Amino acid sequence: MQSSIQNRTIPGWWVPGGTPPEHGSPALHQAILRVSAPLFLVQQNGCLAVGQGGTMGMGPTPPAAEKHFPLHAYVPPIHPEDLGDPLFKETHSLKYAYVAGAMANGITSAEMVAEAGKAGMIGFFGAAGLSLERIEAAISELQAQPGGLPYGFNLIHSPYDPAHEAATVDLYLRRGVRLVSASAYLTLTAPLVYYRVRGIHRDDQGNIVCPNRVVAKVSRAEVAEKFFSPAPEKLLRELVAQGKITETEAELAGSVPVAEDLTAEADSGGHTDNRPALALFPTMTALRDRMMAKYQYARPICVGLGGGVATPESAAAAFAMGAAYVVTGSVNQSCTEAGTSETVRKMLAEARQADVVMAPAADMFEMGVKVQVLKRGTMFAMRGAKLYELYKQYDAYEDIPQAQRAMVERDYLKCGFEVAWQATRSFFEQRDPQQNVRAEKDPKHRMALVFRSYLGQSSRWAITGDPGRAIDYQIWCGPAMGAFNEWVRGTFLEKPENRKTVTVAMNLLMGAAVVTRANWLRNQGVSLPAGAGQYAPMTLPEIGNLLAQ
């Protein structure tokens, strides 16, 4: 630190208050951690020292005060509340630009969403894969929370079950769910557009008001462009013809984007294209800027970042790139409020970055779409890949060689194929009878439904912690889980029983503020001693005390 101050232009001066400058690395570290207070780095006797309080002046002329010190660097306060885009926080009534992403099958539970809302954040209930009854129960639970907490629900693209997607939208509209996270969309659908434009109108001042908001989660620019654009005229005409929206609603829909917020989804758990965040996010913001210039929307579109956000450094990097908000997923699944089993939480707490792999997706099996899952401690990915290989190679289950059929029935299905088909058939009789009609005529489709049944049940076995199916657990997980585990190693957050959603969130936000302040010092020519800019997890009371300083 001493060598870095030689031959450097002094930008200003610092006049102390009642506290003299402090020397040493511990003093600097503590000053960086006090994110709510300004940090003054001054020269005293040829060394750098930390100033607290006092006043600062800029320019080459020394102040008239008797005691003053040359100012070497200055860092303003940056409270965790200051991170992210104020517009995003104002729109959704948030204190923090932090989103608990929607993990399917209720893994992002109503409890998790409620806890996030109480803390001034927002969560999206993981409605994908659940029945309408389960979804409505979660709606009732969240709407019964006092104080009108911010919350949202997932709306997933269902190319093989469009009726369920449409019914989910009808449920959301009927129950007054005003915010959805649209995920896994390859193109826009009529139910999604219907949700967005239903009830659109002008207020007394002539402003267009959209009661229903969409936060899109995408990883491809061509899909993002659809969400950045107004709803397609073709879909609007269909909805008008069906009597679902009025001509006025269709006309006003041309003035707003389908999504007013969009999450650039990088290398995440579950549905993902494994895109690197450093390349994906700038691509999305550049596209956003072009679409804003093209359509001249009244409200700017906010772009956030998810996938890989699991450490103070990754959160700070997201905000430094201009992310309006950050989205977490994998790390939340290891928290106590997650709607999964204790066994899964322990498995996730032991994961390293390389312990993930891509596997066939149950909801888009025939299309070859994959999801990212935990590899360590489970054979699901390998078995899922084998089922997809068999599906691609053979036109009917009966065409598969006997030895491989025996393996599938013994190790995967745990019963004969016909028994598995009858159970699968009963499921689709309630969910989507047309699938059974097609399967009776097409043996390849019947094989696909049975294989999809195994894939779908594997996530539920993990959620319930079925001990007889531990080897088949499907646990959605990205490499961020390993990064988080490495960061918290040796701290109280190493144990999954100590991982609370808000505790994890506040540590990531607090850590991002600390990392940002340390980088501001480096950008002013300060060579920080080892450990001075690092942040270790703290309890919520400890964070509160530090923010109050």
Image (tube, helix red, strand yellow):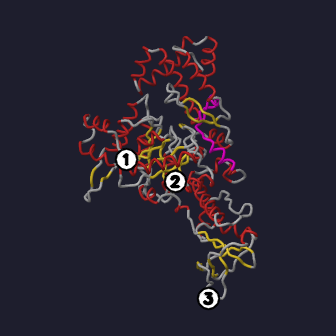
Q: Position of residue 541 (x, y in %)?
A: 61, 62
- The residue under label 1 is 257
Which quadrant would residue 371 be assigned to in this image?
top right
Q: Which mark is residue 468?
A: none
Is residue 145 toward the left or the right of residue 482 in the image?
left
Neighbour tally class for label 3: few under 14, some 14-19, many 20 plus, Cα within 10 Å: few
- Start and end of the magenta stretch? 464-486
Q: Nearer the viewer, residue 26 or 423?
A: 26
Neighbour tally class for label 2: few under 14, some 14-19, many 20 plus, Cα within 10 Å: many
Q: Position of residue 496 (x, y in %)?
A: 65, 47
- The answer to which of marks 2 and 1 sits earlier in the sequence is 1
In the rendered image, the vertical position of residue 208 relative to residue 42, given as above or below: above
Q: Nearer the viewer, residue 333 or 341?
A: 333
In the rendered image, the vertical position of residue 422 relative to residue 290, given as above or below: above
Q: Position of residue 306 (x, y in %)?
A: 54, 47
- The residue under label 2 is 323
- The answer to which of marks 1 and 3 sits earlier in the sequence is 3
As measured in the structure, the alpha-carbon distance from the residue carrying label 2 to the one carrying label 3 is: 43 Å
Query: Is label 2 in a helix, a strand or a loop?
Result: loop
As measured in the structure, the alpha-carbon distance from the residue carrying label 1 to the one carrying label 3 is: 57 Å
Query: Is label 3 in a helix, a strand or a loop?
Result: loop
Q: Which mark is residue 64?
A: 3
- The answer to which of marks 2 and 3 sits earlier in the sequence is 3
Q: Residue at x 55, y 48 (%)?
A: 328
Mark 2 near mark 1, Cβ–Cβ under 8 Å?
no
Neighbour tally class for label 1: few under 14, some 14-19, many 20 plus, Cα within 10 Å: many
